[in-house]
Image (tube, helix red, strand yellow):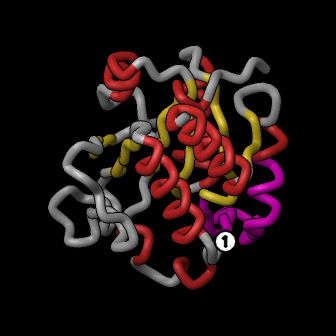
Amino acid sequence: MKKQPIERSALLVVDAQDSFKLGLRWDRRSNRDFERNVGALIDAYRQAGLPVLFVLHSDDDPGFQRDSPEFKLMDFIQRRDSEPLLLKNTRNSFTSTDLQQRLDALGVQRLVITGIQTEQCVETTTRVAADLGYDADFVTEGTMTFPIVNEETGEELATADIIRRTEFVLRKRFARIARVADIVTEVQGALASTAR
């Protein structure tokens, strides 16, 4: 998988919204370092002057309606006016927004993808991004998910199994599985080289 330079990348934060905090599942979330990890990526991208874009998901579920008080970015994110906030009503971040047009206008060829939920909107966005020709980094440490219960059988799929499966299906087909520290180092390296 060819790797586009980090200078041609954008950071995409998918559905990091308070909507997910409603109900009991929040206590069972994976990745207690989600906020810290995503925050580190946002900080690195801002320091390097690289694009950061945010997406919020809307549907009819409680907390996801656009007039709901929970329909907002999580408090650890202080979005800047220059950073787009796109509203979607599909599982991927492209179909119901102008994300592709924005990325193309910025000259973005590589996406570093984070957000909630690991195996749903984040994975789906990654698959579509790859099909559209973007070089994708799926930062698992910058994603979060919840156990899934099969309502027909009562069987539960644990978050560790969800994450493992997601990495298996994305790796080398749709994305590189990336670590926060590696992306931050790469961004800082690009910043240092432009400062010389």
Where does label 1 land, which residue? 30
Q: Is residue 168 left or right of residue 152?
A: right
Q: Is residue 94 left or right of residue 134?
A: left
At 20% from the left and 72% from the top, the residue drawn is 69
Name the secondary structure under disc 1: loop
The residue lying furthest to the front in this view is 196
Mark 1, Cα crowd under 10 Å, few <14 / some 14-19 / many 20+, is many
Is 172 situated above or below 34?
A: above
In which quadrant is the C terminus drawn?
top right
Amino acid marked by disc 1: Ser
At 82% from the left and 54% from the top, the residue drawn is 164
Query: Observer-nearest residue: 24 or 37?
Result: 37
Which image quarter: residue 71?
A: bottom left
Which image quarter: residue 173?
A: top right
Image coordinates of residue 91 in percent, x first then y, are 46, 41
| Residue 124 visible (yes or no) | no
Is 60 situated above or below 128?
A: below
Is 51 situated above or below 160?
A: above
| Residue 181 visible (yes or no) | yes
Query: Observer-nearest residue: 184 or 15?
Result: 184
At 41% from the left and 49% from the top, the residue drawn is 46
Question: What residue range appears in magenta?
Answer: 143-166
The residue lying furthest to the left in this view is 67
Image coordinates of residue 99 in percent, x first then y, are 36, 28
At 47% from the left and 23% from the top, the residue drawn is 108
Image coordinates of residue 77 in percent, x first then y, are 36, 65
Image coordinates of residue 146 in percent, x first then y, are 62, 68
Query: Observer-nearest residue: 132 or 20?
Result: 132
In which quadrant is the N terminus drawn?
top right
